Amino acid sequence: MTNPLRTLIALATALLLSASLAAGTLIGAFDVGPGGSPVPSGPWYNTAGNTWISKMWTPLVSLNETASGLSPQLATSWEANDDYTVWTFTLREGVTWHDGEAFTADDVVFTWHHAFAPESAASPERRPADLVGQEAYSNGDADTIAGIEALDDYTVRFTTAEPAPRFPNTLTQAYILPEHAADFAPSEFQTTDWWFTDAVGTGPFQHDAFVPDESWTLVPNPGYWNGAPQLDRLINRYFADETAAILALESGDIHFTYASGDVAVGLGEQPRFELYDGPSGVTNYMMFNYRTNPLFDDIRVRQAFLHAIDRETIAEVVLNGTAQVVPCIVPFEAYWPETYETYDYDPERARSLLAEAGWDSSQRVEVKTYYGSQFHADAMAAMQQFLAEAGLNVDFIVDSEGYNSYFYDGRNWEISYRGLGIDINAFPYSFYERGGYPGSEGDTGTLMGKALPELEAIFAEARPEGDPEQYRSLMQDVCAWQNENALEAYMWTAVRFGVADAELEGFYWYPAPAGGPYEDHPERWSAPN
Amino acid sequence: MFNYAVRRILISIPVLFAVTVVVFLLIEIAPGDIADFFINPEINYDEESLQAIRERFGLDDPLPVRYAIWIGNVLQGDLGYSFLSGEPVARVVTRRFLNTFELMSAALIIGLVLGVLLGIFTAVRQYSFWDYLFTGLSFLGIAMPAFVTGILVLWLFAIIWPIFPAGGTRTIGIERSFLDHLQYLVLPVFVLSLAQIATFMRYTRFSMLDVLGQDYVRTARGKGLGPAIVQVRHALPNALMPVITVVGLSLPVLVVGAVFTETIFSWPGMGTLYLSAVNARDVPLIMGLNLFIAVMVLAANLLTDLAYGVVDPRIRYD
């Protein structure tokens, strides 16, 4: 029989040993939360998780620290011709891959040919703008993509199929792969073990060990062009549930995790934690389906919805101040007009508008949603109550799995409570354009079943606009039109939170959509000994 | 008994086939499009990308074609690749099964041993203080949901009194060692074994009380045999028959895992794998899991039936 005392000593030794080995090691739950990848993933087929992926691989450009602009990465500068169809990128010199080989323009050309090969399994969530000859190459009708060429070792020229004033913005998740080392076929993007065993990148960290379902350990890339990282190791731990990650953070097993608003606020009050927050970039709103209920075409009904809900109180009280009311679909104040209708809470006004419009208060309206989190459950409960008091009887139906199929069908919903992630650097308005979404057809072929020629006119002007200020002004016009016409019932944009050990130094996290990638300077991070 | 076992195995083959057909159909008739999972509803998606997803995973083939392709691959030993991770289904199921088997078998063994011992203890002390105490605790153990117990235990022993880690299977970054792994096993096994102890204790107690009232036990006492010999040699073997049934019914749990406990303790097992596969409409993974679980359940049932023949010589299978 085992000596209990000896067992205890052995256990204590293991615990102490593990603690001492953690010196300079930062362990985080980088894939917990909306920006994280549901499974460990490599680039070019990931649905999110860019915060982690960018530790090993690098795109030409990334988002900046606050996801409000671009930051040079493997490209140091770029310029376009007058009609934004030819983009020339100057690459960073002196960059080496993790195995010491030099990074050149040939790697960029290789990456595009690999990702868009005829049998490629790459399915980028954020797809780079199409290049000339790309479709022919992907269909097997051409041997190369005519629209990409290496002018020399450090210059790449892209020729887009259509004018693309924001072409660089579409490259933030186009991670560059090593021509000399990416020895997997394009059809194996999703099935190859290369990402988790022999991966070679240009990122600040390089692969060390991958334990399926548990962790991914990286070690510093001593040759990183922005300075060798200070950490000894960077580890991503995988959790099936946010609660488990929070418990691990509280017990000291990890140094960082995403946390829902209600939890983050409580943790942030403890001195041993530091809170990171930022706009989610997702606007929550109710979209009206003009096909299924003609009364939605009456602006008075839509305005009634807005006046009936006390959005400010919900954001401040129900959501613990973790949301900001928005006037239109874009959640960034830079795109809001100077003045706009606030649709203040006014149930009397709502009732009056409904009466004028001939709304039958006995009817029940289904509001379909895919949101199942506590955050949204609380908000929906409050919304339902407010609406009922104004004579609008709604039933929220949560359908997480089948949402997309009935939503894009167009006939199976009346109102949809949903979120739309807006990339401030992209052109985000296909929902409002005829033919802009799957299955759209006909003259009323927008997602909501209503043609919007006034908006389309602004879009037509904005799409080719390359001047940032002029583009911003046009986007403000879009916001003003949506707000004035109460096109949809815009609710709020949520703030998203990350919680980290206060003893971390140089650490930075931002809730960029899909995890970025964004400029977070991981080479500056250090963890307590 | 050998012939019986062979007959049972042969009958299992059409049963397995029927299971796969039913599961495939259930996935098909479930509302929504399988391709839905690949679309983030918060980001605009175009029809071209959606169709590319369908083609890549063969989702636009007719149902019989998809099933025929799958069963054809299975007969060649290929369970396909997970939609979610791109990993071979056989590999991920094997890995998760080993994790689950370790966790659940530890809990089952502890639950069985302690449950039987406590069942005997309370049965021979019927209506005593200890009987009432352990009976009450057993009701608590059965009634308390695992996710409540799990979070409570984790909070107490990983945060308030940080004796054990807050989840995972091993300390990252050090050499694998049994002792290091053991500390991660303690809390989830404790949580899972509570319900097992309670269940086996209740069954054993009831069965022992029934047997202890039989004539042959009274005869054994009348012959002057000591209480320990009467209880262990004469009563217990007969009292264990129902317990074997319960053990047999519990064997499938060794395979399917416990999703709440695995989630809370970040134990990468079959339960969380199955849940994520269903949520993601990961058809190859769901089919592979169901086939694996069906094989294991059929094997467990066969083992249970054969165990009856070993324990009770009166049972014959020929």
Image (cartoon, coloured by chain):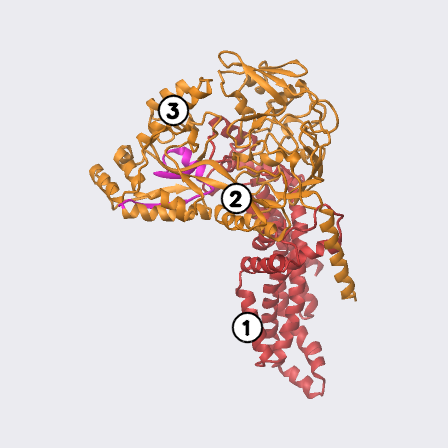
Location of residue A392 in the rendering, given as x and y in whole percent from the top left corner: 28, 44
Gap between marks 3 and 1 measured at Cα: 67 Å
Q: Residue at x 64, y 35 (%)?
A: A522
Q: Which residue is mark 3?
A: A434
The label on residue B279 is 2
Q: Amino acid at mark 1?
A: Gly
Q: Is residue B6 visible?
A: no
Q: Quadrant of residue A113?
A: top right
Secondary structure of the residue carrying tag 1 is helix
Q: Secondary structure at mark 3?
A: loop
Could you tell me residue A236's position as x and y percent?
64, 42
Q: Which chain is the one coloured orange?
A: A
Which label was assigned to residue B210?
none
Q: Amino acid at mark 3?
A: Arg
Q: Nearer the viewer, residue A339 or A142?
A: A339
Q: Position of residue A25 (x, y in %)?
A: 69, 43
Q: Residue furthest front?
A: A271
User: How far apart are the alpha carbons under marks 2 and 1?
Assistant: 38 Å
* Image side of residue A473 versus residue A19, left or right: left
Q: Amino acid at mark 2?
A: Asn
**Residue B193 in view, yes or no:** yes
**Taking A425 as reference, is A461 left or right?**
left
Which range is magenta? A390-419
Chain coloured red: B
Residue A4 placement (x, y as % from top left): 76, 65
